[in-house]
Image: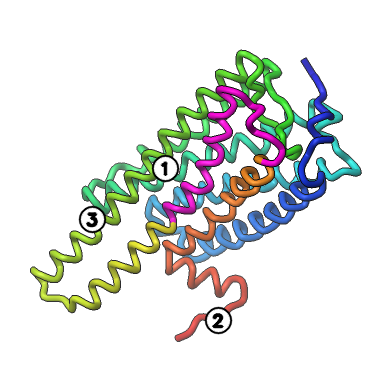
Amino acid sequence: MGRLVSEDYDNIWPSPWVLPIFSIVMSFVCILLGYTILYTVYKHFRKNSHIDIKLAVCLTIMDMLTGLGWLIAGIANLPPLNLYSKYHNWCVSVEITGNTTMVASMNIIAVIALERCLLIVYNIKLKDWVYWLMVIACISMASINTIMVVITDSIKLMASGVFCHYDEETYYGLIAHIFMFSFSTVAIAVLFVSYVKIVLFRYKHSQIQQLQLGLDPEKVKKETKRTAIKLITILCFNLGTITPYCVVQLMGLFNQKYFSPQVAFFVVPWTCMDIIWNSCLFLCMQEDIYVKWKETIGFKSKD
């Protein structure tokens, strides 16, 4: 079909400069943060890493690939270039290089949450290959969707003017919207249920410790509260960054006109932040890695 939608670019709010610059900055931060994390894990933890660290490393790689795609998107859509609205093939390229890995990473987060829940709450330790199959499924689902819309040319420039995504006005674009909305909704449900169960289990377990082991109630309460805050923070940030994407998918099912340039200006940046939040939350949950990571970037640990 190869249609150009330069009118969408002309209607970008508040300025065609804002989101491309934001995308460039976020991408640089994501790639730099991801690189330092991968270097830290490889140098200090590669031999005895538990599956949750391995999954988080996979997520970090996905986020870095997304950041690379969005870096290209940001540069390509600066007003002097404006390549996505001028050349349809550029629009297709960002769907392949950026959006596929972004969608995959959103669902890998749910796999990590599920692994934590099964181990902590139910004391179930599945074989590593089971979780890798889930990761492969997440990547495959996103890839199949991308291949479908690329082959059928069901991609268009979004109202943000920075990214291209499924065209809901085409048959296969609508199918892609339904497919990814369903898949992302399942991921959100798994994420929410898993972390809520972990928080409730931590509180219940702390009460048992106080009664059976005679531990200091204040100390146990403080540690439980600290863990709960961490988990709730992770849940809030993950839901906060995944939910806007699901809202976009839902809008596409009914009427994409609701996804105006003004709405895009607020939804797209928050969704973009997901590639940075994931790395920050990974460091928040893995204190040993966080300590070594600080040393990697030049901060000396306190003895």
What secondary structure do most residues of the magenta stretch adopt? helix
Whether residue 237 is visible here, answered yes or no, is yes
Earlier in the chain: of badge 1 and badge 2, it is: 1
Q: What residue sits right under mark 1 in the picture?
A: 110
Earlier in the chain: of badge 3 and badge 2, it is: 3
Residue situated in front as seen by the camera: 70 or 5: 5
Helix, strand or loop status at disc 1: helix
Helix, strand or loop status at disc 3: helix
Q: As drawn, which residue projects farthest toward the right?
A: 80
For label 1, count other residues whose C-alpha is less than 10 Å away and answer few (under 14), some (14-19) or many (20+).
many
Q: Do the residues labelled 1 and 2 touch (CB within 8 Å)?
A: no
Q: Which residue is drawn at 27% across and 49% down?
A: 197
Q: What residue type is labelled 1?
A: Ala
Q: What residue type is labelled 3?
A: Phe
- The reply, left or right, for residue 43 in relation to residue 200 is right
Q: Which residue is drawn at 52% across and 53% down?
A: 278
For residue 300, the mark is 2
| Residue stretch rendered in magenta on the structure | 234-262
Q: Quadrant of residue 222?
A: bottom left
For residue 233, the mark is none
Foreground: disc 3 or disc 2: 3
Q: Quadrant of residue 245?
A: top right
Q: What residue sits right under mark 3 in the picture?
A: 201
Residue situated in front as seen by the camera: 14 or 118: 14
